[in-house]
Amino acid sequence: MRAVKHTDDEPPRPLPGAPVRDGIPEHGRIPKYYAVKTQVAALLDTLGEGGALPTERDLALRFEVSRETVRQALRELLLEGRLRRSGRGTVVAGPKLEQPLALASYTEGVRRQGRRPGRSLIGLDRFPCPAALAPDVGVAEGEPVWHMERVLLADDERVGLESTYVAVARVPRLDTDFAPDSSFYGYLRERLGIGFGDADERLETVLATPREALLIGTPPALPMLLIHRLSRDTEGRPLERVRSLYRGDRFSFTTHLRGGGQGS
């Protein structure tokens, strides 16, 4: 392969892990808001987690730009999870929570990062199973199923919304024996002796509905990470269907890949 010669007037190489050209268009002209964004990002490193950001007016004076330019830069940093609103001000956000794409509960994933997991029950309903849901939870149409909806918490911060469907026959006393702020997987394993065998998951990005945004406490325009999961027990029988909505500014997901296939 022929080596490519670089000249001194080219933009500097991005740091490892950063986007190629790090936001600089091919014509080489850096948008003014993006230049401000990179300067504010450098400022965040000096302030540290929880540090208060100067006001839009102060930042506009510091960088000699309009307040609208500052506002656009801050909007992107908020969406990326680098900043968060606190009262009437803006502060530096902590690192994103890393959740493994594995057969582990939300509780276990959050605890591994030194955070305190929790859940707040929105509703627990029992209803006849519709035909579309029946194969996913292993019952016939019309048999009773539970629908449990809970807000996900990390150190009392609302970070997601979880919706679980499971057959009443598998967990008949869910409404009386289960503590809604605890791990559902722990309850199945420890109280009922039900183990998880495998699951299918699908991950996509979405915008929350107005109701979901209100429950999680986020603007409707904030991107969300949505995971659909169909779980089976150790005997291969359908167990649950789960819809988990996570704040895109507070979560990232990890997985481990093994070799064996063809590369690109």
Image: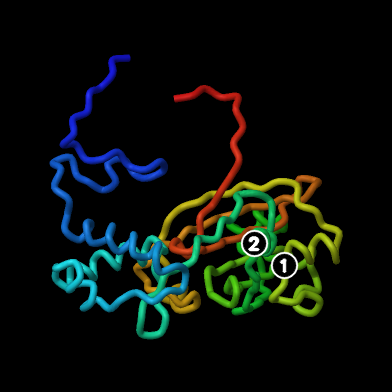
Image coords of residue 92 (percent x, y): 42, 70
Q: Nearer the viewer, residue 28 or 79?
A: 28
Q: Is residue 85 above or below residue 94?
A: below
Side of 52 where 122 appears, left or right:
right
Which quarter of the picture shows residue 130? bottom right
| SS at badge 2 | helix
Q: Is residue 30 above or below residue 152?
A: above
Q: Where is mark 2, residue-wise? A: 106
Side of 175 where 249 appears, left or right:
left
Whichever of labels 2 and 1 marks the residue nearer the N terminus, that label is: 2
Q: Residues within 10 Å of mark 1 (few under 14, many from 20)?
A: some
Image point (60%, 74%), residue name: 155
Q: Nearer the viewer, residue 105 or 241?
A: 105
Q: Is residue 33 above or below residue 146?
A: above
Residue type at mark 1 is: Ser
Which quarter of the picture shows residue 171? bottom right
Q: Where is mark 1, residue-wise? A: 183
Image coords of residue 113 (percent x, y): 63, 60
Image point (63%, 58%), residue name: 241
Side of 69 where 105 appears, left or right:
right
Image coords of residue 56 (percent x, y): 24, 76
Residue type at mark 2 is: Tyr
Image coords of residue 107 (percent x, y): 68, 64
| SS at badge 1 | loop
Q: Quadrant of the N terminus?
A: top left
Report the residue that reaches farthest toward the bottom.
Answer: 88
Q: Quadrant of the C terminus?
A: top left
